[in-house]
Amino acid sequence: MGTSASSKGPGAGVSFDPPWLDDIDVPGQDSQDNNVKPAMGIAPKARFSSARRNMGEYVRSGSRDSARKSLGHYSKTGMGGAQNVARRMRTSTKTASNFFNIFRSLRDDNTFSLGREISELKNRGADASEIIDAIVSHVCPKGGSVDEVSCRDSGASALSEFMDQNPDADFNNLSDDQIWSLTAIYLSNETFNRIQMDMGQAFEKLEVPYVDRVIRLNDMREYIQSEIATQMDALRKNAEQNVDMNRFFQDTIKNTFEVFEVEV
């Protein structure tokens, strides 16, 4: 993942949403779509202090209890609640919706333009990175804001991880379960990136050996991925056939952070 752990994150006394958030153009999505409301409220003083304290303890000890408490404080106090976390991540959930819908189109629509592009790349012997770049370009926003860069980074990482786990998979013919799995990896990457951008400096504690910090980062990523997948599966069991996928992924994020908030 390419998001820096050195970010000091957003401060107090500001909106939970940056003013440019709704200017982001996600391919195939209406940037003025009011389906998701802005995050509500103004950030309090020392908004991430409890989250950072518990994250620091997690980095030192590896305690999952400390990790859960950190994520709970991050959501409840740092972001004003799980609903606000989901709303702040609306670029991420719109892009997750793209991932889901585009891979279904690749499988079900022989005229889909990305499908033809991937076939042409394969026919000329393109490597996996070129195919990943083509998909990311089609799915993710192209601008230079931190959210847009994060989406592309998360998308490329998710596609690469999925290919490592499923070396024989054909992106033009993924099963529904594979599409759900790939989208869950993407959304968990974005969630991990969001936390890193807001309070990632906890992972740079110099008194903790570098190897241990890397282990904690990977463990945190795996933990978030597991919880995102769990919440997604639970929602999927009760979803209507023609569900609004952006709303579905908004609910996935909200439910995930509600679980974390139980710890605080």
Image (cartoon, grey):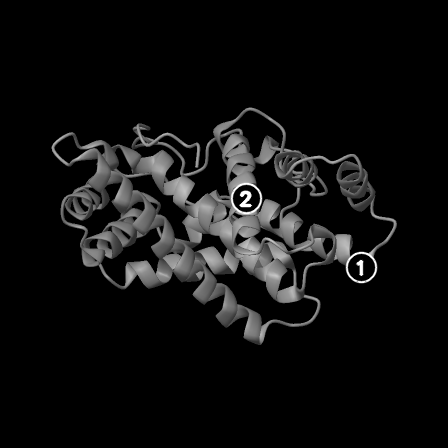
Residue at 52%, 56% (x, y): give it. Answer: 184
Residue at 55%, 51% (x, y): give it. Answer: 162
Marks 1 and 2 in Cβ contact (< 8 Å): no
Q: Residues within 10 Å of mark 2 (few under 14, many from 20)?
A: some
Q: Which residue is mark 1?
A: 108
Which of marks 2 and 1 precedes in the sequence? 1
Residue nearest the viewer, comparing 166 with 134: 166
38 left or right of 179 in image: left
Residue farthest to the left, as pictured: 207
Residue nearest the viewer, comparing 244 with 122: 122
Q: Residues within 10 Å of mark 1 (few under 14, many from 20)?
A: few
Residue farthest to the front, as pictured: 125
Residue at 36%, 42% (x, y): give it. Answer: 195
185 left or right of 58 in image: right
Residue nearest the viewer, comparing 104 with 130: 130
Q: Which residue is mark 2?
A: 160
Q: Residue 165 appears at what percent x and percent y?
A: 52, 55
Can residue 39 be seen here? Answer: no
Q: Residue 201 appears at what percent x and percent y?
A: 26, 32
Label 2 sits on what residue type? Ser
45 left or right of 256 in image: left
* Quadrant of the snapshot with the C terminus: bottom left
Q: Residue 250 appears at what percent x and percent y?
A: 52, 55
Residue farthest to the right, as pictured: 111
Label 2 SS: helix
Image height check: is 108 above or below 111? below
Residue at 60%, 47% (x, y): give it. Answer: 94
* Quadrant of the snapshot with the N terminus: top left
Can residue 221 be seen here? Answer: yes
Label 1 sits on what residue type? Asp
Image height check: is 205 above or below 190? above
